Image: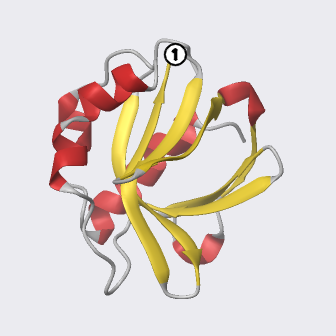
Amino acid sequence: MDGMTNLATPAWWMAGGLRNVPGVLVAGEGRLAFVADDGPVFAAPLTAVGPVSWPWHWFGGGCRITVGADRFNITFVRPNGAPAASTHLLESAQSLAVVLSLGAVPAHSVAGLFDVRSGRAAGKLWKEVLPG
């Protein structure tokens, strides 16, 4: 990922069982973070991220991200019955980026990503950002 590339999109951490945690996946300035309402689930330098896999049965709408010894299943398509990503998280992507020392994140990159087509489009953007 280019150190100047910034991206923030709604995402859900599939934490196990029926627990799906809504949040925002944020990248910028060489760092990656997943932020939920109650704070960061993970935040790490991009060099500490990997491998990242894209299970075929998620049709490009989600990935498995390894950060250190932990693996996170992240989907960009809202799971059935899962709560929506918090409006205040989506509206404050700029503030989240500052808090996480990631630099500016374009506000337009967090809007309107709640259907399957848009979720898959977000996945395509993240494939360009995340390490293979």
Q: Where is residue 4 in the image (x, y as percent from the top left)?
A: 47, 12
Q: Is residue 34 above or below residue 83?
A: above
* Quadrant (top left/top right/bottom left/bottom right) for the C terminus: top right
Q: Position of residue 110 (x, y in %)?
A: 25, 43
Can you tell which quarter of the image residue 84 is in? bottom left
Can you tell which quarter of the image residue 100 is in? top left
Say if residue 111 shows up in the picture.
no
Q: What element carries label 1?
A: loop
* Quadrant (top left/top right/bottom left/bottom right) for the N terminus: top right
Q: Is residue 54 left or right of residue 122?
A: right
* Image point (58%, 87%), residue name: 17
Q: In this view, does 5 lie to the left or right of 17?
A: left
Q: Is residue 54 above or below residue 110?
A: below
* Image point (64%, 60%), residue name: 72
Query: How would you rate the neighbour count of disc 1 (Cα within 10 Å): few for under 14, some for 14-19, many for 20 or more?
Result: some
Q: Mark 1 points at which residue?
A: 29
* Image point (56%, 44%), residue name: 127
* Image point (53%, 71%), residue name: 14
Along the viewing direction, whichever of 12 and 62 lies nearer the viewer: 12
Along the viewing direction, whichever of 132 and 78 lies nearer the viewer: 78
Picture colour scheme: secondary structure
The amino acid sitting under disc 1 is Glu
Q: Is residue 128 above or below residue 120?
A: above
Q: Where is residue 6 in the image (x, y as percent from the top left)?
A: 41, 24
